[in-house]
Image (cartoon, rainbow, N blue to C red):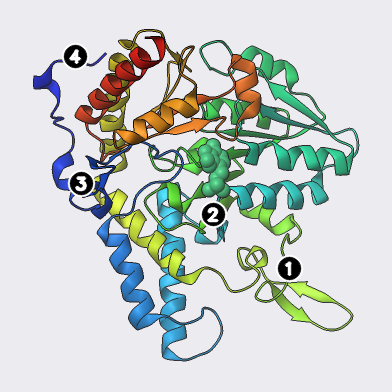
């Protein structure tokens, strides 16, 4: 655990003061207090590199993609495809056509759930998720089960917030068609053993989708080493624009799966009688995409890869350990989710101060936190709490900010307990 001594507050891993200058919002004040932004699990702030690249593209270079053979269109198409290559490099696939742009993780999971199920899921088949999934990785599978007559099975979770792997193994059977779990839980911060989950699913012939919404900003990834079949991400959680994200899909599967959204750009040929489809990824990218957002995503990937995901992970782990330690010193505060492997997310609960009150009181101190069920109501039910407050850290956060949170929490507890 990190020492809470003042001399320890400057990390040797990253020059955080310098990094903070890249993010204009971080120098703002909220209610007259310096902003302490700790809701990075919901969405991250943008560096100048992203803001300026989108502005430059929109002012000087904007055109549609894939259609006309004129300069603006050719250049936009080039930038669009360059970002696809950057995503492929970030996720570790040598084939950039295995990357489909979507509006984000929610759409990526819906794409897989509905398209994969139409081709591969039939009555009596089984789908496995876990008890610590975001609703985006729960509701689509429930709908698929209703529509296809399949059954949803759920991996239980231990009191510390870890998936119970022996129970997972018992759920796997020759009826299992797909296992869909997150890499990092947004509600608890647990890092799931996705390599092992994939290996066990593949051993019985099932496919695996990994919801990477919370892992792509923090972990160095390689989908080929993980050997998963699908991996999803959201641009706005990795310092890029909102409205853009994507899906890695194994090419053989993308080729076999039917289109999800249909219309322009996803076709090979259309007659009034019949349509043939374009090859992936175009088959899954119907309509005019969010072009500026894709360009901004490319700038965000450049930004984080320049810092280095190894360094980001190590520094954020330092923040996690430090934050855990200082928050534990708040009387009565309970951390929900104490897995051995965690990303920089701390969910907590206090019997005397409701999470919504915590968020309001922290906001008065300039500290922006999330309070609620985090779109993970089954997780809240499992841990017997209506909601939690959540501090989710980024590499631009500082230990002093976590001290400020712990102090403000002590003040709030005193106020409520009298
Ligand atoms: N899965 C997880 C684990 C998440 O944290 C989120 C966002 N909170 C989502 C899925 C949904 O992502 P988006 O809203 O970007 O589609």
The residue carrying pointer 3 sits among few (fewer than 14), some (14 to 19) or many (20 or more) residues within 10 Å by Cα, namely some
* Disc on res. 246: 2
Left or right relative to 409: residue 122: right
Residue at left offset 41%, top offset 32%: 360
Residue 289 visible in image:
yes
Q: CA distance from mark 3 to mark 1?
A: 42 Å
Left or right relative to 290: residue 5: left
Residue behind mark 1: 262
Could you tell which of marks 2 and 3 lies nearer the N-terminus?
A: 3
Q: Position of residue 409 (x, y in %)?
A: 33, 20
Could you tell which of marks 2 and 1 lies nearer the N-terminus?
A: 2
Q: CA distance from mark 2 to mark 3?
A: 27 Å
Q: Position of residue 185 (x, y in %)?
A: 52, 30
The residue carrying pointer 1 sits among few (fewer than 14), some (14 to 19) or many (20 or more) residues within 10 Å by Cα, namely some
Residue behind mark 4: 3
Question: Of residues 379 and 358, which is closer to you in this image?
Answer: 358
Residue 202 lies in what quarter of the image? top right
Left or right relative to 60: residue 74: right
* Ligand 1 picture quarter: top right
């Amino acid at each position: 655990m990190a020492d809470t001594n003042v001399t320890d507050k400057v990390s040797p891993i990253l020059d955080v003061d310098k990094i903070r200058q890249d993010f204009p919002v971080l120098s703002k004040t909220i209610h007259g207090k310096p902003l302490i932004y700790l809701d990075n699990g919901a969405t991250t702030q943008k560096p100048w590199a992203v803001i300026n690249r989108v502005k430059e593209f929109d002012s000087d270079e904007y055109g549609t993609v894939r259609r006309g053979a004129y300069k603006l269109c050719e250049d936009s198409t080039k930038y669009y495809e360059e970002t696809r290559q950057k995503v492929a490099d970030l996720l570790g696939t040598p084939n950039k056509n295995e990357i489909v742009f979507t509006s984000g993780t929610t759409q990526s999971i819906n794409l897989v759930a509905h398209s994969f199920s139409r081709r591969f899921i039939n009555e009596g088949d089984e789908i496995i998720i876990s008890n610590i999934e975001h609703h985006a990785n729960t509701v689509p599978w429930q709908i698929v089960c209703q529509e296809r007559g399949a059954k949803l099975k759920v991996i239980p979770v231990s009191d510390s917030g870890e998936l119970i792997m022996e129970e997972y193994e018992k759920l796997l059977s020759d009826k299992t068609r797909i296992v869909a779990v997150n890499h990092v839980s947004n509600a608890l911060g647990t890092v799931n053993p996705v390599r092992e989950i994939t290996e066990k699913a593949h051993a019985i012939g099932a496919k695996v989708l990994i919801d990477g919404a919370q892992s792509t900003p923090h972990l160095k990834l390689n989908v080929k080493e993980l050997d998963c079949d699908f991996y999803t991400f959201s641009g706005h959680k990795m310092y890029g624009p909102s409205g853009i994200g994507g899906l890695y899909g194994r090419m053989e599967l993308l080729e076999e799966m039917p289109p999800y959204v249909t219309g322009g750009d996803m076709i090979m040929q259309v007659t009034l009688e019949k349509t043939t489809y374009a090859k992936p990824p175009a088959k899954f990218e119907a309509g005019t995409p969010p072009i500026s957002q894709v360009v901004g995503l490319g700038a965000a990937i450049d930004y984080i890869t320049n810092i280095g995901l190894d360094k980001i992970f190590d520094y954020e782990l330092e923040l996690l350990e430090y934050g855990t330690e200082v928050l534990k010193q708040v009387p009565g505060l309970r951390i929900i989710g104490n897995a051995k492997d965690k990303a920089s997310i701390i969910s907590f609960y206090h019997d005397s101060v409701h999470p919504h009150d915590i968020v309001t009181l922290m906001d008065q101190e300039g500290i922006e936190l999330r309070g609620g069920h985090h779109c993970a109501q089954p997780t809240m039910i499992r841990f017997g709490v209506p909601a939690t407050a959540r501090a989710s850290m980024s590499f631009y956060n500082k230990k002093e900010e976590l001290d400020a949170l712990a102090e403000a929490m002590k003040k709030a507890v005193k106020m409520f307990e009298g």
